[in-house]
Image: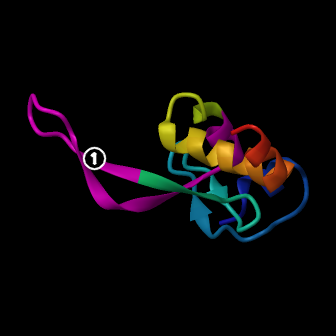
Amino acid sequence: MDCWEHETAGQGSVPAVAFCRHCGAALCREHATVCTDERVRQNGMGSPTRLLPDGRKICCSTCRDAFVESIPVHRAEQRRRELAATGPESATASC
């Protein structure tokens, strides 16, 4: 199976190594994004219990961007990327 992103962009065949958890698109290493997956167990009517350690899930860039507002883990990943892009000096300035 080949990477969906490369195929749709007309960049040729690149073997896929993973599938997007949300849409199922096949992805190569370049287009696959590894996100953390918070594991939570529902306790009936009570508060949920967060299980550790976190899991791992693979997302394509389209689904990651689409779910960044609704899924807390994706928001945290987006914030880390923004801090990495702007550098550590801007992170300390905003505190």
Above or below, 74 relative to 3:
above
* Depth order, front residue of 95/55: 95
Label 1 residue SS: strand
Q: Which residue is at 73% across, 58% downward? A: 31
**x and y percentages locating residue 43 in the rendered image:** 11, 39
Question: Going by the image, does 19 lie left or right of 82?
Answer: left
* Depth order, front residue of 59/24: 59
Q: Which amino acid does label 1 sit on?
A: Val
**x and y percentages locating residue 6 in the rendered image:** 82, 56
Looking at the image, which residue sits at the far right?
11
Question: Colour scheme in the image?
Answer: rainbow
Q: Which residue is at 83% across, 51% downward? A: 89
Q: Which residue is at 63% across, 70% downward? A: 17
Residue 48 in sight from this viewpoint: yes
Question: Going by the image, does 22 lie left or right of 47?
Answer: right
- Stretch of the chain drawn in magenta: 38-65
